[in-house]
Amino acid sequence: MNPKKGEFIATREGYGDAIVEVGEMHPNAVVLDADLAKSTRSLKFGKKFPDRFWYVGINEADLISTAAGLALSGKIAFASSFAAFITNNAFDQLKMSVCYSNANVKVIGSHGGLITGQDGPSAQAIMDVSIMRTLPGMAVIVPADYYETKKATHAIAKHVGPCYLRTTREGIPVLFDDSCEFEIGKAQVLEEGADVCIVACGAMVSEALEARKLLSQKKISVSVINSPSIKPLDSKTILKAASKSNLVVSCEDHSIIGGLGSAVAETLSENQPKKLVRIGVRDVFGESGRARELLEKYSMDSKAIAKAVENGLKK
């Protein structure tokens, strides 16, 4: 798959394509899934390498425990399921079997965020980043498009230690191409600006870029930072951009509690206090609906971001 910029492609497709490449490059890579391989796209690996692929049933605790055992036996173990299930139903195994043991397990959470849509609150992962951020030693990655997801998949395969990679079911705009770079712990300044600094991740990066266009019509200069690495956070890049701005705005398809917004708030408060506005789900559950309708209802689309920026600058 070679999508062009502007096309709408789910980031799970990037993972599915990349994990096959990982399998070709790393003979010790194995993949496990909790009976959702078609949806997570790990089935692509299963078809290519059936002897290195396992279904473990609808049991995320077994999924993570088995992955940890394989990792501690020298494998690079990828374990995938829906983000809402794998982070909630296997937390104890993630804590003890993976993180406490520093097992080389790569946890793939598909169907992240409100934009999972019609499946509703039971399947919409809006707390997964917060949950995984609390685990010692767990890297947390939320890519912005298909190509960044591919690069991130390769990066976590090379990284020794636990990683969480969040992907989407809903198609989101392709922003980059195959030449894009990804490094755990690094953010990218996509646009420069003087008045406001927007830090975004995942599906919200494209919304932030659209908000920038709207704000430019009102002579508000906005920088946009893509921060796919939530943990470790690229504090240096964020602080540098924040120092030149009157306002910092975080944007994430996730609860504003414990995710990117909290990570940015921690960085600012500890190093360089600055006014911060957080865009995300505000301490409520989601509901069923089309992705675009949900972003609008929960004031997370580009128009809502632009409005929040204007209000933030006035206060």
Image: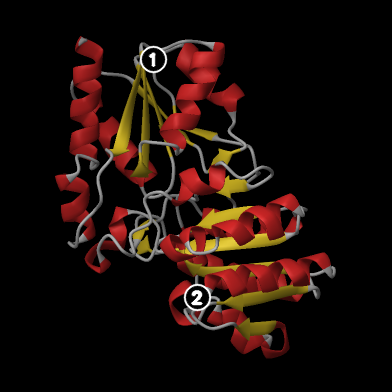
**Residue pictured at 54% horizontal, 35% vertical:** 188
Quadrant hosting residue 116: bottom left
In what element is the residue under mark 2? Answer: loop
Image coords of residue 273 (percent x, y) = 46, 10
- Screen quadrant of the C terminus: top left
Question: Which of the numbered marks, if any, corresponds to residue 194?
Answer: 1
Question: Which of the numbered marks, if any, corresponds to residue 114?
Answer: none
Q: Nearer the viewer, mark 1 or mark 2?
A: 2
Please rate how many residues cluster around mark 1, counting C-alpha atoms within 10 Å: few if below 14, some from 14 to 19, many from 20. some
Q: Looking at the picture, which amino acid does disc 1 mark? A: Ala
Q: Looking at the picture, which amino acid does disc 2 mark? A: Arg
Q: Is residue 143 visible?
A: yes
Q: Nearer the viewer, residue 104 or 293?
A: 104
Q: Which residue is mark 2?
A: 41
In the rendered view, does 143 fall on the left or right side of 79? Answer: left
Please rate how many residues cluster around mark 2, counting C-alpha atoms within 10 Å: few if below 14, some from 14 to 19, many from 20. many
Question: Tag 2 or tag 1, which sits nearer the N-term?
Answer: 2
In the rendered view, does 136 fall on the left or right side of 249? Answer: right
What's the colour scheme?
secondary structure
Image coords of residue 171 (percent x, y) = 34, 63
Q: Nearer the viewer, residue 234 or 35?
A: 35
